[in-house]
Image (spheres, grey):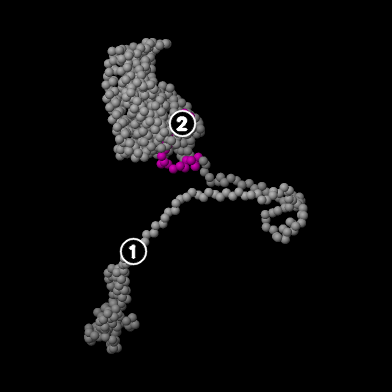
Amino acid sequence: MSHEKTPTDTERGDDQLTQDLPAQLPRRSPDATRTAAVARTVPSAAPVQGAESAPEPKPEPPHEPVRHGFRGVLRGSGACGVSMVVHLVAFVSLGLLVLEPQIREVTEEIVASVMEERPDDVPIEVELEQTLDPVEEVSEAVESSAPVDAAIMGAVTGANAEAPQLDQKVADSLTTYEVKVAPPSLGVPTMTRLISAVPDGQVGDPRAIVDNYDQAFDRITKELMWMLDKGDVLVVWCFDESESMKDDQQEIKDRISKVYAELGLATSDSSDHLMTAVTSYGSSFHNHTPRPTSNYRKIRDAIDAIPVDATGQELMCEAVARSLAAFRRDGRRRQVALILVTDESGDRENNLGYLETAIAEAKAAKCKVYTLGREAVFGYPYVFMQYRHPQTQRVHWLRVDRGPETAFVEQLQTNGFHRRYDAFSSGFGSYEQARLARETNGIFFMLPSVESRLVRGNADKRRYELEAMRAYRPDLRARIEVVADRDRYPLRALIWGVVQDLNPYEHPEVSMRVSFSLDPVAFRKQALEQQKKAIVYLRYLAQAQAALEKGAELRAQEADPRWQANYDLILGQIVAYQARMYEYGMTLEDFLRNPQTAPLVKPPDLRLVHWDIGTRSETRSEESKPYIDKSRQLLDEVIVRHPGTPWAERAKWELNRGFGTRLVPDYDRPYVQVSNPSPLPKL
């Protein structure tokens, strides 16, 4: 570091004095000049006056000659120079100091051994022997735990002192006071405030199991009470317009009146603390309350005005987004809650396009979404309702969107012969509705599937073991994130490929005929076609089995129990389906060789309509036995590895179906020929 040296005050004064001296003063010799310069640096020098009054300078005393050696340089440089030299020498010396190699070698690494953890020492139990005889006589001596004087104690114990007597006069003269301590309730918030103090922005509950609407509305009432405790609230009711929801709407309308009564707002039209709006959706969106209202009569009228949509479309996610956008201005100074009432999961294409938009709209409005919905089908998008046409008397299976519980299907879409018709419970709500509740800090209320016309499967077994299902929860992240993980993990990509290749909705070649004509000629033609098709289908199944067995190591590396269970169940099903397909071909062959007969009619008014393929435990083919043995082993492992889950229940169902097949006569009522029958309803 360089330091710029500035002249001292004394030096600046002498320079100015030299300039002011008159020119007539005699010139000094160079030695005299140097001597005078040295003298000027001495602090005791007298101050110099102006040039006009300056006396004649006196001869200066003799001085020592100026030394030009090192010591002279030090004297001439001053304190600053000396300090700079000393510090420079110190820095150079420190820079030359290094750690000797011998010293570094002495440094050793000390490794401390970790003591093995050992269990706590077993407590020592000592059984004391009874060496003292129990005292049987009661002593009348008075003993005290308070310290007393030794002399007094000796006197009391030494003499036969009588028991102390209470002086009643002294006792009566004492004044007693009753002291009451109030409970420490001052400053403690109420339970309602404690519960409502949970911070916003938390994830919601995507799986709240309830038995009926009453249980769900009790919880909703509490949620609204907690919100009202913090401020004004806007509630938006969004109803599904499908025909299957009409009865539910009437029940909910009656329940809403009870909610308002419990909140103390049923008879107060002027109370604006809780404002309500009503919307509905089908193939389009309807707003039944252009402005939110607190008038319960208007709310009832709005619910009664909900139409029935006959298209079968449910633009659910779009309706949620549009409902929140319609009342965005009204909800700016209020807490907002949207209650979605539906028995379906919504149109799949619409959900793909509007789910994240609805979530973003809800988060922008700080709105909690509560859904009163149904349980999703296990790994399948649909359930089917049995419907008999009132004019033709034909039975139809009407498709209803109710699933899946995941962003994409993770289970086989076939039952081994054709597309699934079961309503196997998943234990969770549909992906879109559960994600809406989770991302907005809302609740998905999972109501039971009570429809009597539902092709049930195991729909009654809707409550799996809660702790067992915790590890199998579906991934409720955004679809784009789920796809990224699926492509990153080889096992998940493998399972997804198998599910898609064996999807009868995408590949008709993996869908087999199960109903055959009563006419022998038509039956023969149909049977021969299906036998050829079965050979191709068996090839598909064999390739899928080989791919899954090759990925056994990937299964061992997969950490998610849900994907492990998917792998285990699908592998067992594919092997079982091969066994049934061999049996299917042999059943048709035996029928061609030895046609069966059945009564054409049955009482009271049933008639034979066709032959149906059914399953049974008895088998026909030798080729199927190795597949039966292997599939039983695999499905039993699913039950053992994943107890109390839908995977275990599905494995039990596959085993109980049996691996053999047979042709059974199917009877139905006579069909009525109608020239222009009414169209089938869309649920």
Q: Is residue 72 left or right of residue 457?
A: left
User: Toward which corner of the image does residue 156 lie, by quadrant?
Assistant: bottom right
x and y, in percent, of residue 678 in the image: 34, 16
Q: Is residue 8 above or below residue 576?
A: below
Q: Examine the structure image and report whether residue 399 is included in the region drawn in magenta.
A: no
Q: Could you tell whether 565 is left or right of 214 in the image?
A: left
Q: Seen in the image, is 370 located left or right of residue 408?
A: right
Residue 468 image-quadrant placement: top left
Query: Mark 2 or 1, which is nearer the eye?
Result: 1
> Which quarter of the image is occupied by the C terminus?
top left
Compute the Cα span from label 2 to label 1: 74 Å
Residue of label 2? 210
Q: Quadrant of residue 33?
A: bottom left
For residue 105, the mark is 1
Whether the residues at callouts 2 and 1 have beta carbons within 8 Å, the answer is no
Q: Which quarter of the rendering shows the N terminus? A: bottom left
Q: In this orientation, does residue 113 appear?
A: yes
The one nearer the camera, 334 or 124, is 124
Residue shown at the point (40%, 11%) measured from the top left: 602
Residue 84 position in % (x across, y down): 30, 73
Q: Nearer the viewer, residue 425 or 639?
A: 639
Question: Residue at position x 69%, y 58% from top?
Answer: 148
- Where is residue 394 drawn, in percent x and y? 36, 16
Q: Amino acid at mark 1?
A: Glu
Q: What segment is highlighted magenta in the picture?
A: 192-216
Marked residue nearer the N-terminal end (2 or 1): 1
**Mark 1 neighbour class, 10 Å CA radius: few under 14, some 14 to 19, many 20 or more:** few
